[in-house]
């Protein structure tokens, strides 16, 4: 089922999510909905709060449906190692039309559970590392516009307010 994407400034996007404790059919259905909703919105990553569910779950597919092996589900993820630096433009389904360069680690290692509750570790660099950091930030209630300088953030917030006023948000 395709669920509606929650947009800034919905407060659910700015509060930390609850850990997942039950690995059941309901969780699997939610993960399926997250992939479906992400593809429908043309995204490559989606965190549960973005469909109004304050749980520590995120899905990523950098291949955008081209390669099933690139579908990643992270439940209760944590970044356990960071290395290097990169700065690239990011966007977010909850902040349509907004793009800005964000400074991130170049490589990260993530520890997470799968839909069955099994723990695993995964390494990512470049775009995947950025996706891990962007999505895990969502689970901590942090949007990428709060990872840029105060000056840039003010400009972005002003742009959002203007779009809201014009009914474009
Ligand atoms: Ni996002």
Image (cartoon, rainbow, N blue to C red):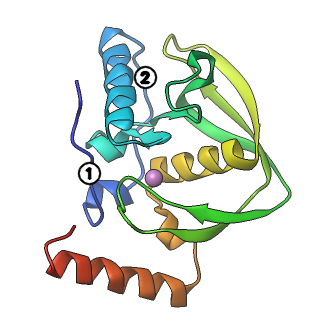
Q: Residue at x 26, y 81 (%)?
A: 161
Which image quadrant for residue 10? bottom left
Secondary structure of the residue carrying numbered label 1: loop
Which image quadrant for residue 70? top right
The image shows residue 136 at horizontal and vertical percentages of: 55, 46
For the view shown, which residue lies furthest in the bottom direction? 151
Q: Residues within 10 Å of mark 2 (few under 14, many from 20)?
A: few
Secondary structure of the residue carrying numbered label 2: loop
Q: Residue at x 32, y 35 (%)?
A: 40
Quadrant occupied by the N terminus: top left
Q: Looking at the picture, does residue 148 appear above or below residue 73?
A: below
Give the mark count. 2
The image shows residue 115 at horizontal and vertical percentages of: 49, 15
Q: Residue 35's mark?
A: none
Q: Residues within 10 Å of mark 1 (few under 14, many from 20)?
A: some
Q: Residue at x 31, y 16 (%)?
A: 29
Q: Nearer the viewer, mark 1 or mark 2?
A: 1
Q: Earlier in the sequence, mark 1 or mark 2?
A: 1
Q: Cβ–Cβ below 8 Å for labels 1 and 2?
A: no
Residue assigned mark 2: 21
Q: Describe residue 118's horizontal placement relative to residue 106 as left or right.
A: left
Q: Residue at x 69, y 21 (%)?
A: 120
Task: Give the camera-side residue of 155 and 42.
Answer: 42
The image shows residue 39 at horizontal and vertical percentages of: 38, 33
Quadrant occupied by the C terminus: bottom left
The image shows residue 110 at horizontal and vertical percentages of: 70, 36
Q: Looking at the picture, does residue 57 appear above or below residue 86?
A: above
Residue assigned mark 1: 6
Which image quadrant for residue 168? bottom left
């Amino acid at each position: 089922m395709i669920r509606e994407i929650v947009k800034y400034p919905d407060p659910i996007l700015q509060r930390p999510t609850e850990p997942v404790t039950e690995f059941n059919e309901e969780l699997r259905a939610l993960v399926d909905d997250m992939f479906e909703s992400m593809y429908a919105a043309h995204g490559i990553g989606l965190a549960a709060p973005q469909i109004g569910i304050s749980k520590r779950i995120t899905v990523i597919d950098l291949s955008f449906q081209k390669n099933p092996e690139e579908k990643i589900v992270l439940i209760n993820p944590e970044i356990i190692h960071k290395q290097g630096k990169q700065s690239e433009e990011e966007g977010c389904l909850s902040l349509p039309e907004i793009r800005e360069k964000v400074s991130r680690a170049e490589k990260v290692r993530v520890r997470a559970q799968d839909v069955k509750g099994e723990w695993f570790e995964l390494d990512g660099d470049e775009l995947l590392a950025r996706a891990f950091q962007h999505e895990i930030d969502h689970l901590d209630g942090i949007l990428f516009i709060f990872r840029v300088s105060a000056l840039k953030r003010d400009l972005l917030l002003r742009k959002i307010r203007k779009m809201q006023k014009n009914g474009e948000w």
